[in-house]
Image (tube, rainbow, N blue to C red):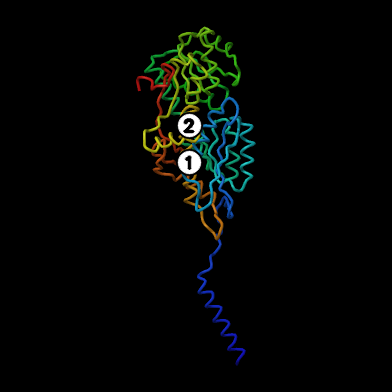
């Protein structure tokens, strides 16, 4: 009897102890189709930016990474776990982009990426992220076909080049009154698709396209030979798909190649102070594409923070730092929505994160109010054309 009584007492004391300690926490079981990223105390949630950080196009990468950095400064943690931003250099090249993407896909602490920045680089990297289940939010890849590929991970806050090409062709034909053009591109996926689409749209309006799109080799210092061939066709305007460094070389050599008085019409890749700095007086009267940033208290604060943090005026390097900010902000918000605390750990289900990004609605960003559709289009549906007058970009007339 004493033994039985003692056993009962021990059992009662055990039950009291369990009740006083409260319910035991059940560990989170990952059932996400793509798996989960698991963060132990002290580990950081990695959201890298990928773009050209060195080379001729480094201004784009540096500027966008700064915008992303300011977004992280404003929202540095999720449920007590620190967000880590690194800037990964893909040189803007498809080969290096694939190398960087493979490196990031092998890191279990990478939950999403801001990037890539150039369309050719993105084409090379996208299948790798798709396989790894890592969502992308590109700040600047405008090539139309990205959101028609059925990708579950690709998203962008930039506009589509389908819109840019249609609007550019219409502006050239209807507002500028141009009837004969030649298109050029830098051989990359972005520039080639844009030049081809502008030529098609311009011809559909009734204009004359004097040749197939003319390709150049990017990074060279002398384009006088292709420009001389174009001059023999006697165009009224050259439309160029590519980036600022090569565009600057082209415009400085147009007059010497027999193209004095012929207009140069660039794209969003040629817009920015860097183009004017490189081209000098030859930039005068050239056109480009720009996404207007709505005036707001948030944008005023962003510009002030940018200047204080980096010593440069916002917009000096490229127009895309607000895009980098909004891309990162959307990703952080989505991580916060799906992340789950399990004991001391944080769990981020990967497919749920991709779906949360696509479900973004009414996000108040620097670019305006952003809502993602089911294909990953999250950017504002607006753009304007700019012209260099007296050494500065101003809104071109007739819009």
Relative to 190, does residue 251 appear above or below in the rendering?
above
Relative to 111, does residue 144 appear above or below in the rendering?
above
Left or right of 199 on screen, residue 39 = right
Query: Which quarter shows the N terminus?
Result: bottom right
Observer-nearest residue: 87 or 219? 87
Mark 1 neighbour density, 10 Å: few (under 14) some (14–19) many (20 or more): many
Residue 151's tag is none
The residue that label 2 is drawn on is 320
Relative to 397, does residue 37 appear above or below in the rendering?
below
The residue that label 1 is drawn on is 71
Element type where label 2 sits in the image: loop
Element type where label 1 sits in the image: helix
Residue 61, percent across and down? 54, 32
Residue 158, percent across and down? 46, 33
Image marks 2 and 1: residues in contact by CB distance under 8 Å: no
The residue at 60%/89% (across/down) is: 4
Q: Given the current orientation, which residue lies at the most extreme left position? A: 398
Q: Given the current orientation, which residue lies at the most extreme bottom position? A: 1
Query: Which quarter shows the C terminus?
Result: top left
Q: Which one is closest to the eye, mark 2 or mark 1? A: 1
Residue 97, percent across and down? 61, 34
Residue 135, percent across and down? 53, 43
Task: State the image quarter where residue 192 is shown.
Answer: top right
Label 2 vs 1, first from the N-terminus: 1
Observer-nearest residue: 81 or 163? 81
Mark 2 neighbour density, 10 Å: few (under 14) some (14–19) many (20 or more): many
């Amino acid at each position: 009897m004493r033994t039985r009584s003692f056993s009962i007492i021990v059992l009662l004391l055990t039950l009291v102890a369990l009740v006083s300690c409260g319910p035991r926490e059940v560990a989170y079981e990952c059932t996400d189709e793509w798996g989960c990223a698991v963060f132990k105390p002290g580990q950081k949630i990695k959201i890298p930016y990928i773009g050209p950080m060195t080379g001729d196009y480094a201004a784009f990468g540096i500027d966008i990474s700064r915008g992303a950095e300011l977004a992280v400064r404003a929202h540095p943690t999720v449920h007590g776990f620190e967000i880590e931003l690194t800037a990964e250099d893909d040189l803007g090249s498809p080969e290096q982009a694939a190398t960087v993407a493979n490196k990031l896909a092998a890191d279990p602490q990478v939950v999403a990426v801001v990037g890539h920045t150039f369309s050719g680089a993105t084409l090379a990297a996208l299948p790798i992220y798709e396989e790894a289940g890592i969502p992308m939010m590109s700040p600047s890849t405008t090539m139309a076909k990205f959101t028609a590929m059925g990708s579950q991970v690709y998203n962008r806050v930039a506009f589509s080049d389908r819109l840019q090409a249609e609007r550019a062709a219409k502006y050239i034909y209807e507002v500028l009154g141009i009837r004969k053009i030649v298109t050029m591109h830098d051989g990359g996926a972005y520039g080639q698709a844009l030049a081809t689409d502008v030529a098609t749209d311009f011809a559909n309006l009734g204009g004359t396209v004097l040749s197939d799109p003319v390709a150049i080799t990017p990074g060279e210092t002398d384009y006088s030979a292709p420009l001389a061939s174009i001059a023999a066709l006697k165009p009224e305007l050259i439309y160029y798909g590519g980036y600022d460094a090569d565009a600057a070389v082209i415009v400085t050599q147009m007059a010497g190649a027999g193209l004095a008085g012929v207009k140069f019409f660039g794209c969003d890749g040629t817009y920015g102070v860097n183009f004017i700095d490189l081209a000098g007086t030859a930039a005068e009267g050239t056109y480009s594409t720009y996404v207007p940033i709505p005036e707001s208290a948030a944008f005023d604060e962003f510009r002030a923070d940018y200047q204080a943090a980096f010593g440069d005026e916002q917009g000096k390097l490229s127009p895309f730092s607000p895009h980098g900010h909004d891309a990162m902000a959307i990703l952080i918000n989505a991580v916060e929505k799906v992340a789950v605390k399990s004991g001391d750990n944080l769990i981020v289900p990967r497919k749920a994160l991709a779906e949360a990004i696509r479900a973004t609605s009414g996000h108040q960003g620097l670019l305006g109010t952003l809502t993602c559709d089911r294909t990953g289009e999250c950017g504002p549906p607006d753009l304007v054309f700019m012209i260099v007058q007296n050494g500065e970009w101003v809104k071109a007339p007739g819009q």
